[in-house]
Amino acid sequence: MHAVAADRAKRPAGFLAARGLIAATSAKRRPLVVAGDYDKAAIMSAAIAAAKVHQARTGSAWSEALSVTLKATWALAKATRAATTH
C-alpha cells in the first residue's frame, strides 16, 4: 500500500500558496479563459507575477518558482474552463 502512495505525483512546495495568490490576483487582471479558450498570454503573465512573489518568499531559483506557478496557473485555468463549460 505504501508503494502505491509513493507512486502518486507529489505537489511541489508552494503549489497551494501560488494557486491562492493567482486566484486572488487574476480577478484584477485579464481572465485566464475567454470564450471557452485559454488565454495563454494571460496565463503566462499571471504565472510570472506569482513566480516573483514565490521566489521572494522561498528564495528558490527562478526556474523552480516559474515551474510551480505555471503548474498552479494552468490548474486554475483548467478548473475555470471546466466550471464555465458546465
Image (cartoon, grey):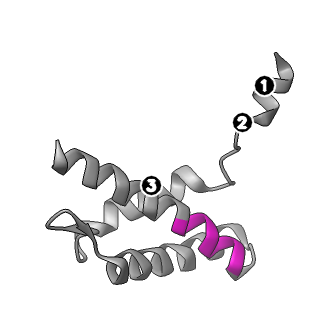
The dominant secondary structure in magenta is: helix
Farthest residue, direction top: 1
Amino acid type of the residue tagged 3 in the rendering: Ala
Q: Which residue is mark 2?
A: 8
Q: Residue 8: x, y in percent? A: 72, 36
Look at the image and give the residue range highlighted in magenta: 63-70
Q: Residue 40: x, y in percent? A: 36, 78
Q: Earlier in the sequence, mark 2 or mark 3?
A: 2
Q: Which residue is mark 3?
A: 75
Farthest residue, direction right: 3
Q: Residues within 10 Å of mark 1 (few under 14, many from 20)?
A: few
Q: Which residue is mark 1?
A: 4
Magenta stretch holds residue 26 = no
Q: Is residue 29 left or right of residue 9?
A: left
Q: Earlier in the sequence, mark 3 or mark 1?
A: 1
Q: Is residue 60 above or below residue 20?
A: below
Q: Are marks 3 and 1 in contact (CB under 8 Å)?
A: no
Amino acid type of the residue tagged 1 in the rendering: Val
Whole-Å distance between the Cαs marked 3 and 1? 24 Å
Magenta stretch holds residue 69 = yes
Q: Kindly indicate the quadrant of the structure image that contains residue 1.
A: top right
Q: Is residue 70 above or below residue 86?
A: below
Residue at x-position 78% and y-position 35%: 7
Q: Secondary structure at mark 3?
A: helix
Q: Secondary structure at mark 1?
A: helix
Q: Is residue 5 left or right of residue 21?
A: right
